[in-house]
Image (spheres, grey):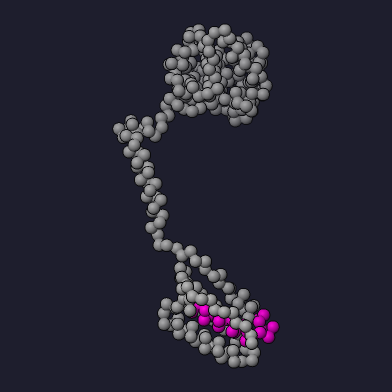
Amino acid sequence: MGDRAGLIKPSDLRTWVGEGNVAVLLCPFQNAHLDELGLRVESGPGEEAGASAESGAPLTGEAPSLLLKSGATFKIEEAKFPVQVLYTTRGLPAVLLATLGAGRMILLAESFPATNVGLPGNDNALFLLTVAETVRGGGGVLFDETSTRLEMGAPGVMAYARKAGVQPIFVELGILALLAIWHFGARTAPPISRRPRPRAAVPDYVTGRARLYEKASMGRTAVRALAETLRDALRRAKPDSDADAAEGQKLLERAGRLERLRSPRDHDLIDFARSIHDFMNEAIWKPGRRFRRAPHTAPWRPK
């Protein structure tokens, strides 16, 4: 099987059949070959259905029924050549035989009977074998699914370009230019910092952590750790304004006062932790801010 009929003009195919050959056209949609014969394809319910052989129809003696997938049928009232109904479904013609000169053209309203899935259904395989046997001893047989729409009134982009007087090379260059604009245009926006932003702690988390240190009698340790974190951040990224720098200095002085206490009070430790958190978010962890390369501060160890 192939798509040769899509490459052959309808008039040439009719001439070839008239010389004593057989063409089996699987027609899941309307095409130029059906237009040449004056036939129309009508869509079906889209459900599997059987097709029964007409009484006395040729080629159907050993294959009384076919299995169809879509239930599509033909409309033959305006046929330009004599056609004979071989199989019907729901009382409508599903497989036709057109005699053209010394040859025959068999037309099926869908391609399912000749597919790998459809061949085992009912007498599908036996019917197609019977058709092929008719040319034994002379002539040729052509099985084709006219689904490529080649030479069937659906030209491609280049065909439209030639019809409009535009050389295909200019169409291709235009498409490449659009792709280039799209590719480089995506890089005209301001660069986005790739530095992973530290995950900001939520106020509830900061409060809970401060209370945990307080209950463990480690208030001074928590104050020293927070102050060391602030000092390290100020060394790596200086605040943008003098007000932020002054606020950072005030927090360090406050840390010094709290460190002198034997055990900072609960609300003082919580308020200090929240102040450090807010200052880091507003003055240090700004979007796109880059830290300067600086040596890490050694972790504090109690003496």
Main SS category, magenta section: helix
Q: Does the magenta stretch include residue 61?
A: no
Q: Where is residue 47 in the image (x, y as percent from the top left)?
A: 62, 30
Q: Give the vertical position of 111 relative to 190 (above or below).
A: above
The residue drawn where x is 66% and y is 19% is 123
Q: Is residue 232 magenta?
A: yes
Depth check: give the residue in front, 296 or 30: 296
Along the horizontal axis of the image, is 76 left or right of 261?
left
Left or right of 236? Residue 69 is right
Residue 241 pos. (x, y %): 41, 79
Residue at image position (44%, 18%) is 10
In front here: 134 or 60? 134
Q: In which quarter of the image is the N terminus?
A: top right
Look at 32% across and 34% down and name the residue there. Answer: 167
Q: Tell how many labels.
A: 0
Q: Where is residue 231 in the image (x, y as percent from the top left)?
A: 52, 81
- Vertical placement of 162 versus 16: above or below? below
- Residue 23 visible in the shown view: yes
Q: Position of residue 194 (x, y in %)?
A: 48, 64
Taking 240 as reference, is 29 left or right? right
Rendered image quadrant of residue 159: top left
Q: What stretch is highlighted in magenta?
A: 211-234
In this rendering, does residue 267 appear at all?
no
Quadrant position of the C terminus in the picture: bottom right
